[in-house]
Amino acid sequence: RYLAEFEYRFNRRFKLDAIVPRLVRASVQTPPMPGRLLKLAETSW
């Protein structure tokens, strides 16, 4: 099952016509995050 999911994602990685809609969907479904948390994550790398 894990291999099948990896294969599915691997084969879809360069599907250029779907990149923008998937990005929009992911950004709409993700909860907002304060800027201070983003900066904190950036400095911890």
Image (spheres, rainbow, N blue to C red):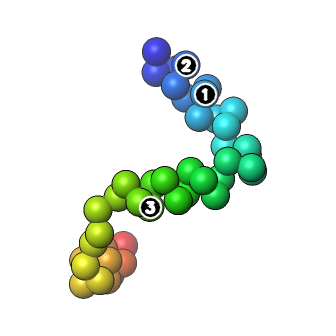
Q: Amino acid at mark 3?
A: Ser
- Which label lies toward us, 3 or 2? 3
Q: Is residue 32 above or below residue 3?
A: below
Provide the secondary structure element on which disc 3 rests.
helix
Q: Residue at x 61, y 26 (%)?
A: 7
In the image: residue 31, left or right of residue 25? left
> Do the CB atoms of the residues marked 3 and 2 lie less than 8 Å apart?
no
Q: Is residue 36 above or below residue 29?
A: below
Q: Earlier in the sequence, mark 3 or mark 2?
A: 2
Q: Quadrant of residue 6?
A: top right
Would you name the residue on which mark 2 appears? 4
> Do the CB atoms of the residues marked 1 and 2 lie less than 8 Å apart?
yes
Q: CA distance from mark 3 to mark 1?
A: 22 Å
Would you name the residue on which mark 1 appears? 8
Provide the secondary structure element on which disc 2 rests.
helix
Residue 23 seen by the camera: yes
Residue 8 spot, x, y in % from top left: 60, 28
Residue 9 spot, x, y in % from top left: 59, 34
Q: Earlier in the sequence, mark 3 or mark 1?
A: 1
Q: CA distance from mark 3 to mark 2?
A: 26 Å
Residue 27 has which mark? 3
Residue 31 spot, x, y in % from top left: 29, 62
Q: Residue at x 67, y 48 (%)?
A: 18
Point out the image quarter for the C terminus: bottom left
Toward the viewer: 4 or 19? 19
